[in-house]
Image: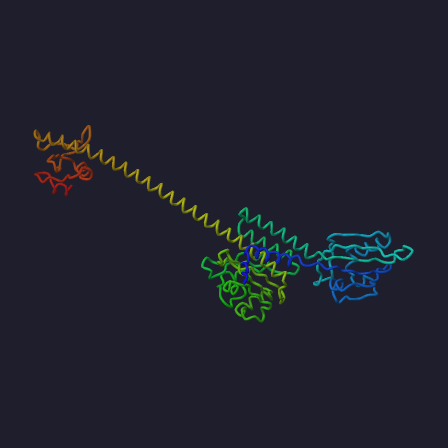
Amino acid sequence: MTAVPAADPAVAGRGAAEEDLRALFGQSTAVFASLTGPAHVVETANRAFFDTIGQERVRTGVALVDVMPELADQGFIALLDQVYGTGEAYIGRDVRVVLGSGPQAREAFFDVSYEPRRDADGTVTGIRVLGVETTQVKHAQRLMTEHRALLEQIARQAPLTEVLDGMARCIENLAPQEVLVSVLLADPDGRHLRHGAAPSLPGFYNEAIDGIATGEGVGSCGTAAHRREPVIVTDITTDPFWDDFRELAGRAGLAACWSTPILARDGGLLGTFAMYHRTPRVPQESDLALTRVFAGTAALAIERHHIEQAKTAAEARARAAHDELARVLRVERELRAEAEQRAVASAELAARMRAAAAAQAALPHPEHCQLGDKPGCTAPAEIKIADSWGDSAWGCTAHVEEAILNVRSVFIASEELGGLAAYLNR
């Protein structure tokens, strides 16, 4: 039995991306029509031609301008007249044409050729029209250009709101049919979704859904975030997921919502990417491909934003730690300096006490304080203090207080006119 090699994830990823590109670029179909006479009467046309202009306009034996009156104001009938009159063919690339009128009008692009038809004598009798619609290709190319611009924004670390808003507007401007894009961002715990970008949705709608919970049946986005898989609601008016939001969607003029979860590389929830529509609608493969492409772009932008946030927070913590360390070192230096000062003062006081003790042999109770520094303290000597080595001195209340605080093992001597009573009554 031959073992089947495991699929290479990188190859599988490239295959999925290529499928998305094929869905976005579409497959071109050639359209053909044969026109006759100076009025450009539609003699025959293939099915693709009538599919392009609309099956309701399938007619032959009538002038092209009667089948497609919108062509006259766009210069195409005049161009056909020129080819018919000069006998010179015309070739155009990515020629823009608006098909239809009113709400049903759509922009399309074609590579076209108008070739004169001639009889046996070489006289021009009509024109062959051959075209290949390039609308999807052109739209997809424009989308890819915008997509590259978004990637460049992400690379230069543009603000997340700017990237997401630009992405939403890009899709809305380039999508063949009207679409309203919304991006919601997941809270760190993944339990709620916050407003990220929705440039075309009403403000009251964005405010109402800001902070909605993730969970089964919580609209399209809450459910997609909960399931970690796309949720396609083609008709909001009947879908049970929208029971709690149906009236809100009605006020906003929304009829369909397709939501895709935005996932990190580790599978964590980053948010949701939603496409709203004004009428009930089922997505085509090109819609799903578009969603996958830009949901991935949103994931890249959000993850980069989270990385930058974490980096900024780490730098702030490092700065705070550095500042705290500097403060501690400063306080330590101040305390060390104060301790050194106290040591110096203590040594000086101890020396004065030894000098005072020696002087007491001749004068047991001096008139003035013996504890003051040079040139000496003139305050009355009221309280006697002693240390553990037997040295004693008389001092004023201020210098006795200083000695008690700064000289180790100093106590108040109990003696007439001095001692604890005098100290307490100072």
Q: Nearer the viewer, residue 307 or 317?
A: 307
Residue 412 visible in the picture? yes
Write down the quadrant of residue 415 in the picture. Answer: top left
Name the side, left or right, on which 350 lies relative to 239: left
Find the residue positioned furthest to the front: 1
User: At which x and y percent is residue 372?
Assistant: 18, 32
Frontmost residue, 319 versus 142:
142
Task: Name the image colouring.
Answer: rainbow
- The quarter of the rendered structure image containing the C terminus is top left
Residue closest to the far right: 121
Q: Nearer the viewer, residue 392 or 97?
A: 97
| Above or below, comparing residue 285 to residue 362 in the picture | below
Q: Residue at x 50, y 55 (%)?
A: 265
Q: Position of residue 243 (x, y in %)?
A: 53, 70
In-front residue for pair 86/366? 86
Please count the marks in the image.
0
Residue 81's quadrant in the figure? bottom right
| Residue found at x 20% / y 39% | 405
Where 135 sits versus 366, above or below?
A: below
Residue 77 locus on image (x, y percent): 81, 57
Quadrant where the image shows the N terminus = bottom right
Q: Is 68 positioned to the left or the right of 330 in the image?
A: right
Is residue 384 at least partly visible in the picture? no
Left or right of 380? Residue 128 is: right
Q: Is residue 421 left or right of residue 87?
A: left
Answer with the quarter of the image where residue 348 lies.
top left
